[in-house]
Image (tube, rainbow, N blue to C red):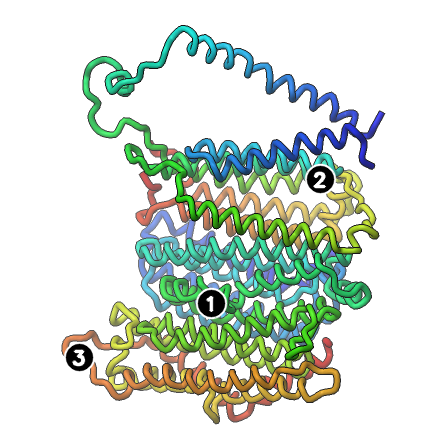
Amino acid sequence: MNYIEFTVFLLPEIVLLVTALAVIGIDCARRGKAATGAGGTLASASLCAAGILVAALIILIMPQEGRIAGGMLVLDPLTRLFKLVLLAMTLVAVLMLMETRPVRHVGENFAVMLFAAIGMMLVVGTEELLVLFIGLELTGISLYVLVGFARSDIRSAEAALKYFLFGSVSAAFLLFGLSLIYGFSGSTELGEIGVAMQAGGMEPLLAVGLVMTLVGFGFKVAAVPFHLWAPDVYQGAPAPAAALVASASKVAGFFILAKVLLLGFAGAEGGAAWGGFQPGWVPLIGVMAALSMVVGNLAALVQNRVRRLLAYSGIGHAGFMLIALMAATPAALASVLFYVVIYGLTTLGAFGVVTVVLRAREGDRLSDFAGMSRQAPLLSFSMLIFFVSLAGLPPLAGFFGKFYLFTSAMGAQAAPGGQPGMLWLVLLALVMSAISLYYYLLVLKQIFFVEAAEGTPVIRASKTGTWTCSILAAATIVLGCYPGILLGPIRLAVGAAF
Amino acid sequence: MITDAAFIAFAVLGIVTLGATLGAVAMRDPVHCGLALALAFCGVGGFYILLGAEFLGFIQLLVYVGAVAVLIMFVILLTRRPDSGQDTNSRGFWSALAGSGVALGVFAVLAVAISRSPSIQTATPADPEASIAAIGRMLVSSHLLPLKMIGVLLTVALIGGVLGAMQEGGKLER
Amino acid sequence: MTESSPYLFLSVLLGVAVIFPLIPIALARGWSLAFTPLKPGIEKNATYECGIATTGSFRVQFKSQYYVYGIIFLIFDVEALFLIPIAVAFLDLPIGAVVATFVFMLLLFECLAWAWFKGALTWDG
């Protein structure tokens, strides 16, 4: 055990931890004076942003490679890249938090956001079940706290309670499944579990372990039938918390799910072919993918509130990504990771716009967005970019995300020894993408073509809000024109890791 | 090694634990349910000791019986409404039936899975070294990262729990 | 002698400890059943059996402060449990491990300081 090396490897997380504690400390010190007001918020937010930037800089300028303590902490290009992505998303959430109405205990609110980021970074950077579970719990508990932070709002409390109950039950499932897998393979390291699974073959108890693990992860990525928390949480939580749940937590969830499936469950794929059914995780993921696409996209059609709409469309997007996970090839993995990053960025941006509208008009009904293009043109244009990208129209990033996702899934079917039966899922996904265009356009119609009713408050975006959303929109356009900027490194990193 | 004494202990613990968990879901008064749950926690701790995981057994007693059960009792006493007949644990016949059905189904699946799995019968993994000193050495060497993460996790849990119990005005409720 | 023999003594003691208080309770119960028949009524079940009608809620509402203390106790209980095995192995730990332990304890102190500053430890009656 080399403690110096341990500290150096963990330096980004340690920086975040120290920042979080410093934010809490400053908040406590200010308590003697008037702790409310914008001053406290600004101080906490800038400290958080500085901490995140320092952590990102450390990741950038100190490229460490290696693994300690049997895969508990793995540093390779892939984990570094995703830690950076998570840090960027947390930074946006911090900026959004600065934009929302100040609540009591501002310092704690920012600090818990950083704790969530620490948890997600550790989840992304591990290949060991113990660290994975504790990291997921750290993320989960931080997010429950964040979701329930608007204490004067009964909806926030309801969302937090639902999220907490669903989350702890699914964590129990996950832990039970992981313990069965540990008992079967005798190891908590994903690589060794994969070896044991390839050697041992399928047996009933292992199948129970697989199912329970997938239940736990299904909750984390909000796939049907474990999605019921999502609409209430997106709607009830304070917008920055909801944005973090929708973007960064989903990125971390998909990343670790992919890693567990491809590394740990490598010998237990099974088959989902018509008539050629084999027990394994691929049929389970297939069912979850199909259900998520159908339920998510159809339910989004009838939503009247934009945050609920984003929640259901997020469930649909989770379904798309699960299809490519079934393919279980490095190319498909790269496309899933590309897609989830794009999805996270666009959803984050959409939540940023929703935050501004919420602050101005006290609601997020479709009609609350009416006439927005006159009052906040830059913000409206950003929303256009985000929603068109989410719907998957060229030339935006979402189109290439979907394109790579579906081609890699089809490629896995064509390859010898690949997964047959993907064609049907991809066709279903194409139909559902077309449906999703409709509900995204409904919101855009309100923004651009419906006049605001008399007496509705004017939407005024602050500089930070406009800049953040514009930068995210610009990123969506740039990644659409040059997807290689992100896809190239992801492919390289995936190639190095698998 | 199954001796007669171990078997008797297992049987007694099993009956106590099962009876207590049944009581925890079936009794009418939530206070009684909470107490039955504490007894069930004791029974589970007994199982750990019986299986040779003594440290885990005592942790179970200390944390679950000593702290979690007490917390559960506090919550029951805090949240029950005085003067209303609602603080009984009564549910309809059908929901009880559905609950029992689900529980029996899960039990049946697990039982079948365990009885049909060859690796359970053949291979028993080697006992990891489980003396308290060995656990201590592991906690600060190979398992240092999980230890630190638990430290952070508990910090967040404390912040969340305390803020959750506090009122908007910063004063504690009631 | 089997391996579980140290626990045999404990379990016998546990049995005695459970039965011993049950005997007087059962005796008292039997006594009341035999000699004082139950005749409940509105007057008899009133909170104060003294003829004056009760006004308002008669149950004591517990303060949520108890819950805050309970949470804080639970957190520190768990943290202490992780310190026990480290304490047992403390004498043959390398210096890095000792530093790591202190960092863990620093987190613990930070929790305590935070709860103190937030006034979660003050009892305002």
Residues flagged by tags 3 and 1 on a common chain: yes
Q: Which residue is mark 2?
A: C85
Q: Amino acid at mark 1?
A: Leu
Q: Viewer-proximal residue, C74 or A49? A: C74
Q: Position of residue B165 (x, y in %)?
A: 39, 44
Could you give the CA–CA distance between mark 3 and mark 1, rounded to whole angstroms?
Answer: 32 Å
Q: Which residue is mark 1?
A: A244
Q: Which residue is mark 3?
A: A453
Q: Quadrant of residue B42?
A: top right
Q: Is residue A63 visible?
A: no
Q: Amino acid at mark 3?
A: Ala
Q: Is residue A390 left or right of residue A135?
A: left
Q: Is residue A338 left or right of residue A247?
A: right
Front disc: 3 or 1: 3
Label 1 residue SS: helix
Q: Position of residue A120 (x, y in %)?
A: 57, 64
Q: Position of residue B151 (x, y in %)?
A: 59, 49
Q: Quadrant of residue C55?
A: top left
Q: Viewer-proximal residue, C124 or A412? A: A412
Q: Residues within 10 Å of mark 3 (few under 14, many from 20)?
A: few
